[in-house]
Image: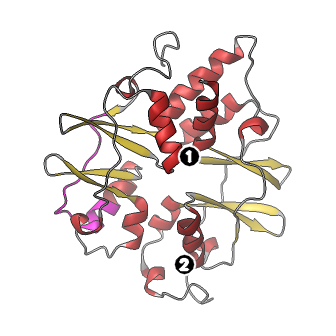
Amino acid sequence: MLAQDSVGTDSGVHVLMTPRPITIQPSSSVRDAAMLMQSCRVRHLPVVAPALVGILSLRDVVAADERALVGEVMITAVHSAAPTTTVASACRQMVAGRYSCLPVVEDGRLTGIFTATDALRFVLVSLEADSATQRGCPSVAQLMTPPPLSTVTSDTTLAAAWQTMQARRLRHLPVMRADELIGMLSDRDVLAAGRDWLRDSDAERQDGLLVVDAMSQRVSTTASERPASEAAATLLHRRFGALPVLSGRELRGIITVTDFMGWLLARA
């Protein structure tokens, strides 16, 4: 557990980053990258040769031919941080650019990666520290993204759902039946579904793979009146990026790792 009195938003990201991140080479295949992402449950792979030359995201992998090489589909305009970049500055850059990570580079050498999960660990410590003071811990309702929310129905084609996720740069879509939440579709679910559904470019076809075939049906949720620290702990423990906020089975909002980083910046 992080020591609140030794780490602050003005500390360098080196104190929170994940050192020695999992990497891949540009000569590796997209298929190998997909297998690595799934087995290690990561959404980004720094591409090294041996210096950092790009980054490969889960979105890049889903959209690419699995026979392609990483170097052909990776992002080469990489946004990175130095070890001394402050936590606040890194979070601000990630929230503004809607990034999930920043490779940490020193003298041209990859030394680590600062992810939204690393930031969330610090957020949880800050929330718990506030609970012990007069500030108090905010509720989920104070941090969550309220309606209107992007959602999808279970009978939507996976191709159409993925188009929505790409267009709106979303990692998660609540899956609804009428007004009831019945599942969540994440970008990891999309990756696990394979690529056959992508061969048909017509997202309106109804005979392709459907959201119900790929979504997660066992969904962790929270309530708007619950402490935000509880939701942050659930996200960290379950390695999720978002929690639907319910009243009964009615969707009242969604709380994401980005929401927590926004709170951290406002607090700072």
Q: Position of residue 123 (x, y in %)?
A: 57, 28
Q: Position of residue 120 (x, y in %)?
A: 54, 33
Q: Residues within 10 Å of mark 1 (few under 14, many from 20)?
A: some
Q: Position of residue 211 (x, y in %)?
A: 62, 72
Q: Position of residue 59 (x, y in %)?
A: 43, 63
Residue 27 placement, left or right of 227: left
Q: Nearer the viewer, residue 175 or 4?
A: 4
Q: CA distance from mark 1 to mark 2?
A: 22 Å
Q: Residues within 10 Å of mark 2 (few under 14, many from 20)?
A: many
How many marks the image carries: the answer is 2
Say if the magenta span includes residue 121.
Answer: no
Give the residue type at disc 1.
Phe
Q: Range of the magenta residues? A: 19-34
Q: Is residue 15 above or below residue 67?
A: above
Residue 240, numbered label: 1
Give the residue type at disc 2.
Ala
Question: SS at mark 2?
Answer: helix
> What secondary structure prevails in the magenta region?
loop
